Amino acid sequence: MSYNIVSLNELTAQFAKLPGIGKKTAQRLAFYVITAPEEYAVRFSQALVNAKKSVHLCKNCNALTDSELCSVCADESRDKGIICVVSDPKDVMAFERTREYKGVYHVLHGVISPLDGVGPEKLKIKELLARLSDGVVREVIMATDPTVEGEATASYITRFIKPMGIKVTRLAYGVPVGGNLEYADEVTLSRALEGRNEI
């Protein structure tokens, strides 16, 4: 009979389901939680449950928030005339780390990818177009990842925005082609914002 601890194996299996976590890392995390003081495990589990219950989409931009509006949309000092369109909530955090961007965001929650069964109707494109109808927005920055899917998504959305007379720009490429924005450093993202090109 092999050495087997059912509850520890279950905890390891749950950690292993997280993106980027392999079996050995999952096992290390599980052992850490088990050997930590009990109050740590309780706080950890409470934080997990609380975040799951309270974090939802901002009613304006679809970024993550635990309030009605995210902190960017609620900030009166932000320039509501510039919307940076990103594919994922993590991209908002990446841009905010630069402390350079003063506009607002719109999160699509994905990119068009027919091979993965993701069409335009599954993204928050209608919501973006609705935001553009009030005449306040003067520029939309297409900041989807520089991948085939990201480029296709940017091109698709641009076709709807151009007839509205709104300037559409694309990030300049200090961002590596095929890369993910969330992994780009602050300086690279700042320069990509500064050097954005009109589409």
Image (cartoon, rainbow, N blue to C red):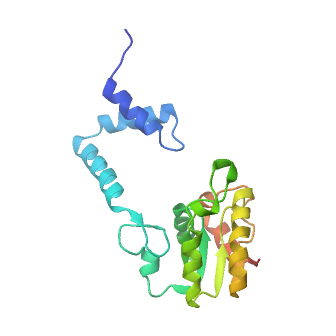
Report whether residue 102 is seen: no
At 72% across and 84% down in the image, what residue appears?
163
Q: Residue furthest top?
A: 1
Which x, y percent locates residue 8? 34, 29
* Quarter placement of the C terminus: bottom right
Report whether residue 82 is seen: yes
Q: Nearer the viewer, residue 4 or 147?
A: 147
145 on left or right of 29:
right
53 on left or right of 113:
left
Question: Residue 102 sits in which quadrant?
Answer: bottom right
Instruction: Check the image and report above or below for 84 versus 110.
Output: below
Which x, y percent locates residue 51? 34, 57
At 42% across and 75% down in the image, what residue appears?
71
Instruction: Check the image and report above or below for 74 versus 179.
Output: below
198 on left or right of 122:
right
Q: Residue furthest bottom?
A: 135
Question: Residue 81 sits in which quadrant?
Answer: bottom right
At 57% across and 72% down in the image, what residue appears?
126
Q: Nearer the viewer, residue 17 or 27?
A: 17
Question: Residue 196 sits in which quadrant?
Answer: bottom right
How many numbered dots are placed on residues in this image? 0
Which x, y percent locates residue 13? 42, 33
At 71% across and 78% down in the image, what residue appears?
169
Q: Nearer the viewer, residue 121 or 73?
A: 121
* Quarter placement of the N terminus: top left
